[in-house]
Structures are given as structure tokens and as C-alpha cells.
């Protein structure tokens, strides 16, 4: 088959499938609802509805009896938490979890769209499943998460990945029972992606991954529209949960014995601003959560733009809010920050860091950095290096800029060759490693409090856990210590972890180490 023929055949297949899907949509309301990034960009004034009466329809309750599921998760904590929600829904339908992909009756791929390589990984994963689908055609394969919100991805799946049975997005996870039902009944690929964010739905069942640490969503979406970023398109407009719903969830986690929670949002500093008449922000929420008996509370991610003195004050007051602030800077150069749409300058960022350090002297600061932004010069990149030194971050996640279709930056011409970007990333990573090592070295000889999570990944006879500032510590201790805060004497600092000697179960929780 020549190129022309191949093209027209795949278009035929596509048209056929489109037609089938549309026919089906007569019977099933949402069966073919593809995404649109253009629609997703819009920010309406409509009020967000809060649905506290969510229930799974009784008729689906036995749908998964005797069947198993497996969810593969890519991307950020938000996605990991969505996976817990999907696991909860599937559990409520009667499915049980399996770790064996060849046994799973339902396989969901929860995807991330943040960079091209994240997307490539997903496509190769879906490609790998073609074989399995051939062997076991009754397996239902679903693609969900942020990539599903992009029309280019949906089109590519429709065209080249016929082994996929259903695609749904980030806004309609709660419709998983209906979507699954449609996938069982429909011969066509079920596509149900909402480009406009939906309601905030409380009380969806969840099966949390662990019994020690938990994620708590405090808001959804992002309105910052940094010029490189796809998230405001894939996650919709900012919608905060109501304080009482969050507090109730945290109290419930405390009652269940969870030792650590992480409050989640794309930009948690905006928390509460979207709820009309609510004069209550992240500082207030953090303060209220300090009253709850849970030893450690983290929050992520903070945009430097609206980090308030109130927040600094609450963290400085101690209690259970850990003095670890992840504060993505992205670049140390003003011109680059401007075209990124980050809304702060190098100077105002450094001033914020000074304010934080003055009030919280033991703070651990970490960051995210993008190198090789379109037309970034060597001198501009060097300003990122010098800012890194000036702040002395304890760690950073570093990325080469990746063009995301539909974002404003995708239209910018880029004169920075790939090898220059790679070389900059290497130079930056060298600095990151140096500072991380220094941060680790400071712990040698000290006693730290560790939340013991279980056996180390590398050695089953060794236990491992994290300090409040997220340093991994390995030590030998009785298994009863799992799930508890313990005191450990640090003997040796490695590049990414500390080795220590177990002393005792901690008498009381402290977050200052
Ligand atoms: N809401 C968070 C970021 C979530 S994405 C925040 O603003 O802090 C996590 C990180 O991925 C970002 O901080 C950024 O450093 C990186 N990132 C986002 N889009 C990117 C892109 N197009 N190319 C490369 N890195 C990107
Ligand atoms: Fe993306 Fe910026 Fe929103 Fe973070 S704040 S999710 S980087 S648009
Ligand atoms: Fe990726 Fe979506 Fe998170 S794009 S980083 S999974 S919000």
C-alpha cells in the first residue's frame, strides 16, 4: 500500500468509526463527545455547582463482580489521586484490583500531557497492549487523564489504536460506570471527554493507595495560563472545594490513623478565591488544619505570585505544617519569566524567598525549572544558574522546554538547538546535585524524625521513610515501627538518601527537622 492509499484507508476507517459512534450516540447520550482545546481555554462566569449527593446507580453495582482491573498512572499527584478515585468507583462496581496486566478485565491508562516525552511513553504503552487485546478481545482498555483532553490525542487513538475501547477525560471520572457500560455494549470506541469543567463532586468513593500518607484535593484546575503549559486546558478553570468539605476529609483521615496528608492543587495559593463571598484563603485553611491531630501536613504546588504573608505566618507558627515549600521558579531571567507569563520577576521571587527565610529559618525550598525556552540565550540561562545559587534550593525538578500544541508558546519561533538545550540541562543538573548533596550532608550526625513507611525498595531487611523535609532515610528497625514516627540517628549522607540508626519511636511529632 502506498502512502496515499494508506492515508485514505485510515480516513475510511476513521469515517466508518465516526459514523458508528454517531449512530450509537442516538442510544447513549454521551458516547461520542470529543474534546476541544479551544473550548477548554474559555473561562466562563457560570457558578460552579457543588454536588454532595453523588451516588453510583444501583443498576451498575454488580457490573464488575468476579472481574479485575488495573490502572497505570502517569503524571503528577493529582493524577495519582484521580487513580484512587477511579479505583474507588471500580471497587463499588464489584471489580477487584490486580497487578497482573494479563489477568485484568479492565485496564485504564491514566495519562499526563505535560511534556512530549510523557505522551510518547503513553503511546508506546497503548501500542504494547495491542497484542494483549488480540489475545483477549474481551479486555476493556480505557485511556483517561490529561492526554484525553487533547483532540490531537483522541484523533490519533481513533486512527491508530483500535485496541482502545474507551476514552474519557479529567472532568467526567464520576461517569466511569456509565462509560464502562457503554464500552461493553458499543462496538465503536466510546469517547466521552468534556472540554468544559464539570461540577465539584464530593463523596465519590476512593481507595487510597496507602494507609500512612494521603492526598487531599483542595482545588481543581488552573487559571494561570503560563504560556508553555497545557494544564489550564486539560484541567479546566480553578474550582476550590469548600473548606468544610476539606476539613471533614482531613478529620476523617486523622481518625483513620493517617500520619501525613498533602493538600493538592495546581496552584494552591489561589485556594478560595473563586468562591464568591468566601473571605478564606490557603493561610486560613492551613491554620484550621493545624487544629487537626495529624502529624504532618504538606501542600503543593505554590505559585510564587500569590504567596501571602498570612501563609508564611501560619507555616512559621509550627504545628503540623511542614516547613518544606515547593516554589517553582522556572527561570532566573526577567525576560524569560515575562514571556512565560509567570507574573513575577527575579527580584520579586528573591524578595519572597527572603521573606520566607526570615520568618521560617529552617525552611527547605525546592523548585521546578525549565531550560531552553524559545530563544533563551546563554546569558539568560546563566541567570537561572545564579538564582539557583542565591536561593540554595535543596532540590529541583528540571525539564527541557517541550512544545505543547494549543499553548501560546507553541507559536513562538525557537532558535535554541536541541543539543544546546541538553547541555544546559546537564549543567543545571550538576548544580542541582551539588546543592542536594550539601543539603544531605548537613544531616550527618543529627537525629531526625522519620515517618516509617515500610521496607526499603532496595533491601527488604531495611526500613525506609521520609523526614518532614522529604529526605529519604534508610534504617534497620522492628517492623512494628511501620506507620509510626521514629527517631533515627543519621550516620551517613548519600546523594539522594540518608543511612541511619534507629533510636526509638518518637515521643511526639515535630516537623522542624
Ligand atoms: N502547577 C504547577 C506545575 C505543574 S507542572 C506549578 O505551576 O508549579 C510541573 C512542572 O512541569 C512545571 O513547574 C514546569 O516546570 C514543568 N512544565 C510544565 N509545562 C512544561 C513544558 N511545556 N515543557 C517543559 N516543562 C514543563
Ligand atoms: Fe501550568 Fe502555570 Fe498553571 Fe502551573 S500555574 S499548572 S505551570 S499554567
Ligand atoms: Fe500531567 Fe495533567 Fe498532572 S498534564 S502533570 S497529569 S495535571
Image (tube, rainbow, N blue to C red):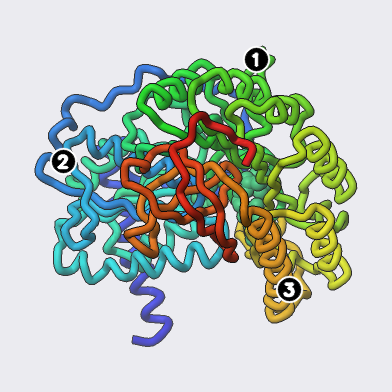
- Taking the spot 28% from the left edge, 66% from the top edge, the residue there is 129
Quarter holding the N terminus is bottom left
Q: Horizontal and vertical percent for residue 503?
A: 47, 45
Q: CA distance from mark 1 to mark 2?
A: 41 Å
Q: Horizontal and vertical percent for residue 349?
A: 83, 45
- Residue 36 is left or right of residue 371, and the answer is left
Badge count: 3
Q: Horizontal and vertical percent for residue 360?
A: 75, 35
Circle 1 Cα neighbour tier, 10 Å, few/some/many (<14 / 14–19 / ≥20): few
- Taking the spot 47% from the left edge, 27% from the top edge, the residue there is 199
Q: Horizontal and vertical percent for residue 433?
A: 67, 66
Circle 2 Cα neighbour tier, 10 Å, few/some/many (<14 / 14–19 / ≥20): some
Q: CA distance from mark 3 to mark 2?
A: 51 Å
- For mark 1, give the secondary structure: loop
> Above or below — where is 176 with respect to 429?
above
- For mark 3, give the secondary structure: helix
- Taking the spot 16% from the left edge, 37% from the top edge, the residue there is 94
Q: Which residue is mark 3?
A: 427
- For mark 2, give the secondary structure: loop
Name the foreground residue: 337 vs 363. Answer: 363
The quarter of the displayed image where residue 437 is located: bottom right
> Above or below — where is 111 with respect to 326?
below
Which sits earlier in the primary sequence, circle 1 or circle 2? 2
Which sits earlier in the primary sequence, circle 3 or circle 2? 2
Disc assigned to residue 507: none
Q: Nearer the viewer, mark 3 or mark 1?
A: 3
Callout 3–callout 2 Cβ contact below 8 Å: no
Q: Which residue is mark 1?
A: 278
Q: Which residue is mark 2?
A: 64
Q: Nearer the viewer, mark 3 or mark 2?
A: 3
Amino acid at each position: 500500500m502506498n502512502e496515499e492509499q494508506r492515508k485514505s484507508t485510515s480516513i475510511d476507517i476513521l469515517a466508518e468509526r465516526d459514523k458508528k459512534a454517531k449512530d450509537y450516540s442516538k442510544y447513549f447520550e454521551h458516547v461520542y463527545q470529543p474534546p476541544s482545546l479551544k473550548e477548554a481555554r474559555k473561562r466562563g462566569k457560570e457558578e460552579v455547582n457543588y454536588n454532595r449527593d453523588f451516588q453510583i446507580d444501583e443498576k451498575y453495582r454488580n457490573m464488575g463482580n468476579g472481574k479485575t482491573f488495573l490502572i497505570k498512572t502517569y503524571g503528577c499527584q493529582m493524577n495519582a489521586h484521580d487513580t484512587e478515585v477511579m479505583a474507588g468507583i471500580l471497587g463499588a462496581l464489584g471489580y477487584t484490583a490486580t497487578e497482573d496486566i494479563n489477568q485484568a478485565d479492565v485496564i485504564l491508562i491514566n495519562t499526563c500531557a505535560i511534556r512530549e516525552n510523557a505522551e510518547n511513553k503513553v503511546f508506546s504503552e497503548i501500542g504494547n497492549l495491542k497484542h494483549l487485546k488480540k489475545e483477549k478481545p474481551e479486555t476493556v482498555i480505557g485511556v483517561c487523564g490529561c492526554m484525553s483532553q487533547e483532540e490531537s490525542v483522541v484523533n490519533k487513538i481513533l486512527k491508530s489504536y483500535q485496541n482502545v475501547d474507551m476514552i474519557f477525560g479529567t472532568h467526567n471520572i464520576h461517569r466511569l460506570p456509565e462509560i464502562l457500560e457503554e464500552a461493553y455494549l458499543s462496538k465503536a470506541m466510546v469517547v466521552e471527554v468534556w472540554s468544559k469543567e464539570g461540577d465539584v463532586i464530593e463523596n465519590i468513593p476512593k481507595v487510597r493507595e496507602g494507609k500512612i500518607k494521603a492526598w487531599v484535593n483542595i482545588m481543581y484546575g488552573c487559571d494561570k495560563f503560563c504560556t508553555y503549559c497545557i494544564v489550564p486546558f486539560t484541567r479546566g478553570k480553578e474550582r476550590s472545594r469548600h473548606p468544610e468539605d476539606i476539613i471533614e476529609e482531613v478529620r476523617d483521615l486523622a481518625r483513620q490513623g493517617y500520619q501525613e496528608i498533602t493538600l493538592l492543587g495546581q496552584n494552591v495559593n489561589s485556594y478560595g478565591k473563586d468562591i464568591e463571598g468566601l473571605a478564606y484563603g490557603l493561610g486560613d485553611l492551613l491554620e484550621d488544619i493545624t487544629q487537626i491531630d495529624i502529624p504532618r501536613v504538606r501542600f503543593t504546588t505554590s505559585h510564587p505570585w500569590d504567596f501571602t504573608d498570612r501563609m508564611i505566618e501560619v507555616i512559621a507558627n509550627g504545628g503540623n505544617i511542614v516547613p518544606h515549600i515547593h516554589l517553582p521558579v522556572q527561570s532566573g531571567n526577567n525576560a524569560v519569566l515575562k514571556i512565560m507569563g509567570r507574573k513575577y520577576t527575579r527580584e520579586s521571587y528573591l524578595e519572597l524567598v527572603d521573606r520566607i527565610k526570615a520568618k521560617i529559618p529552617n525552611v527547605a525550598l525546592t523548585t521546578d525549572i525549565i531550560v531552553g525556552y524559545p530563544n533563551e540565550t546563554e546569558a539568560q540561562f546563566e541567570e537561572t544558574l545564579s538564582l539557583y545559587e542565591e536561593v540554595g534550593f535543596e532540590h529541583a525538578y528540571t525539564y527541557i522546554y517541550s512544545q505543547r500544541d494549543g499553548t501560546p508558546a507553541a507559536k513562538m519561533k525557537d532558535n535554541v538547538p536541541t543539543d544546546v538545550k541538553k547541555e544546559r540541562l546537564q549543567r543545571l543538573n550538576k548544580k542541582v546535585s551539588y546543592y542536594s548533596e550539601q543539603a544531605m550532608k548537613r544531616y550527618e550526625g543529627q537525629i531526625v524524625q522519620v515517618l516509617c513507611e515500610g521496607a526499603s525498595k532496595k533491601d527488604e531487611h531495611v526500613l525506609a521513610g521520609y523526614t518532614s523535609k522529604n529526605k529519604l532515610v534508610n534504617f534497620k528497625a522492628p517492623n512494628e515501627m511501620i506507620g509510626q514516627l521514629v527517631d533515627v540517628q543519621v550516620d551517613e549522607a548519600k546523594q539522594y538518601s540518608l543511612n541511619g540508626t534507629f533510636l526509638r519511636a518518637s515521643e511526639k511529632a515535630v516537623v522542624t527537622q
